[in-house]
Amino acid sequence: MENRINIQQLEPKAYKAMLGLEKYLATTSLTDIEKELIKIRTSQINGCAYCIEIHTKDALRYGETQKRIFALSAWWESPLFDEKEKVLLKMTEEITHIQQKGLTEHTYTAAQKHFTGNEIAAIIIQIGTINLWNRIAISTHLKHEN
């Protein structure tokens, strides 16, 4: 697959706005690992190899283990993720698959037990942001230069 348009070059204001969201997300109380779990799982769901590669490397750099990354595609069965992380990943799936039911009342209530309102807002924004990055990467056939 050939690369298509380069949105960063063609629409630098839009790209700058996306980077603004990333700067905001860096200031939230979500941990680097939590953010990377969201990014990897969303990218798995969306089939974005480019983003999976980037965020897997980032997660490892932040101290995530290979074993947990390997188990991420079946997180609900894995004893490697605690209840808080499982709620985070359930939110990730429900919001990414928004057309099914969206963020269910059950999951939202569970999230309130583990996260503050501001953290829930940050999680939703993080999920939305990586979904847009996935769509940009997939639509433009973005690839890593090896």
Image (cartoon, grey):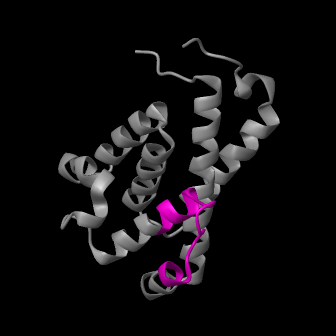
Which residue is at 59% across, 31% downward?
A: 137
Q: Nearer the viewer, residue 135 or 12?
A: 135
Left or right of 19 in this view: 86: left
Please tell me how many numbered marks the rendered image carries: 0
Compared with 34, 86 (above or below) is: below
Residue 47 in the image: state x and y as whole percent: 47, 38
Q: Is residue 92 magenta?
A: yes
Q: Nearer the viewer, residue 73 or 125?
A: 73
Q: Is residue 90 magenta?
A: no
Specify the quadrant that holds the C terminus. Answer: top left
Q: Residue furthest top?
A: 2
Q: Nearer the viewer, residue 87 or 23?
A: 87
Which residue is at 52% across, 65% downward?
A: 94
Q: Nearer the viewer, residue 44 or 130?
A: 44
Which residue is at 61% across, 61% downward?
A: 98
Left or right of 108 in this view: 5: right
> Which image quarter: residue 54?
top left
Residue 17 in the image: state x and y as whole percent: 75, 45
Q: Residue furthest front?
A: 100
Left or right of 47 in this view: 76: left
Which residue is at 39% across, 55% downward?
A: 37
Q: Specify start and end residues of the magenta stretch as a single range.
A: 91-108
> Which image quarter: residue 139?
top right
Compared with 12, 32 (above or below) is: below
Residue 18 in the image: state x and y as whole percent: 69, 45
Residue 52 in the image: state x and y as whole percent: 42, 38
Compared with 100, 21 (above or below) is: above
Specify the quadrant that holds the N terminus. Answer: top right
